[in-house]
Image (cartoon, helix red, strand yellow):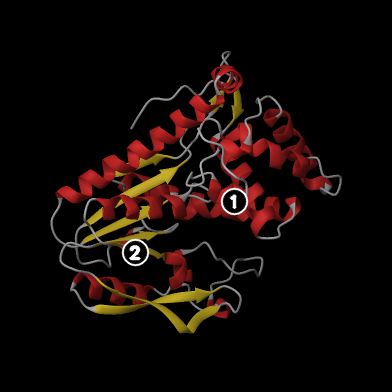
Amino acid sequence: MSNINNELEYINETASAAPCYLVEKCEARYKNIIDEIACRVCEDKGREIVMLAGPSSSGKTTTANKLAQAFREHGVQTYVLSLDDFYINREDIPMLPDGTRDYETVYALDLDCFEKTVNALLKGETVKSPIFDFTTGKRSDTRFNEITLGETDAVIIEGLHALNPVITDKIDGKLMKIYISVSSRIYDRKGKIILNKRNIRFVRRLVRDYKFRDSTVDNTYKLWKNVTEGEDKYLFPYRSNADIRINTIHLYEPCVLKQQALPLLENSEISDEYKSEAAKLRKSLELFEDIDISLVPQDSLLREFLGTETKTKKV
């Protein structure tokens, strides 16, 4: 929805001379996209279902919540549901040829429950939307989201499969379909790719999973292979179904994420299988100037990966 200057030299020059300006500009670009979508939704009348899909570490959770907040500011009561809460019990999830569970397939979801829940919402009925307990690997017996959609309310449904016809064809109502991802690489002025799209998402996930999911670098790399294969099979073929695309890149993000990613990538305990990849990524991140993490606004999409424990300086 807007042009960006994704050259390494521009990022570094601006990060060095005017870091607050770079942060503010990136945050404003993303906010403007959210506001534009909110205006579009509020022009419609009737119950609105927004399907929001994107690959791992694209910022689905933050984007869904920011869209909901923007809709509410326009007078549209909005709820957020995650497709992850519609998982079937862990022991029933289909198997891969290697004997592990295929958590990425659309058939790991309880499609009948999803269909009944969403279509009841569209009829104005009160539903008890499930909450999946990832500790037990089962749907919670005691917790749920009780929702009733008013005549002009909206619900945002986010998840890997939100654009898959196996999901969307089950909904008997109008849909707005949104695809989000990091949609820009970072180049140098000679045209060399410094960070590709998956590199940027991997750095986000590396930092987040270490901080909040007790994941080692090796484990993140191991999971990443299955995650990206799942995206190739179950997400990317349906990108063209989207009505709107959102590029969630924040050009200054390597300047802040590198400060937490580099020590992880320099870890001597990284196995030989991943050392070469880690060294290459480390070399790329070292090219970026630092920006004080405290300059990242507390409501920034990047806080989904960095956390909010650092006091923010005024931008």
The residue indicated by pointer 2 is: 167
Residue at 61 percent across and 55 percent down: it is 226
Q: In this picture, is 111 found above or below 259?
A: below
Residue 92: x, y in percent? 54, 79
Residue 1 shown left or right of residue 273 in the figure: left
Q: Depth check: give the residue in front, 60 or 20.
A: 20
Q: Is residue 244 above or below residue 72?
A: above
Q: Which residue is mark 1?
A: 307
**Foreground pick, 232 / 117:** 117
State which quarter of the image contains the N terminus: top left
Q: Quadrant of residue 120?
A: bottom left
- Answer with mark 2 or mark 1, whichever residue precedes in sequence: 2
Q: Residue at position x 69%, y 53% from top?
A: 210
- Hey, what amino acid is under mark 1? Gly
The residue tagged with tag 1: helix, strand or loop? loop
Residue sitting farthest toward the top: 190
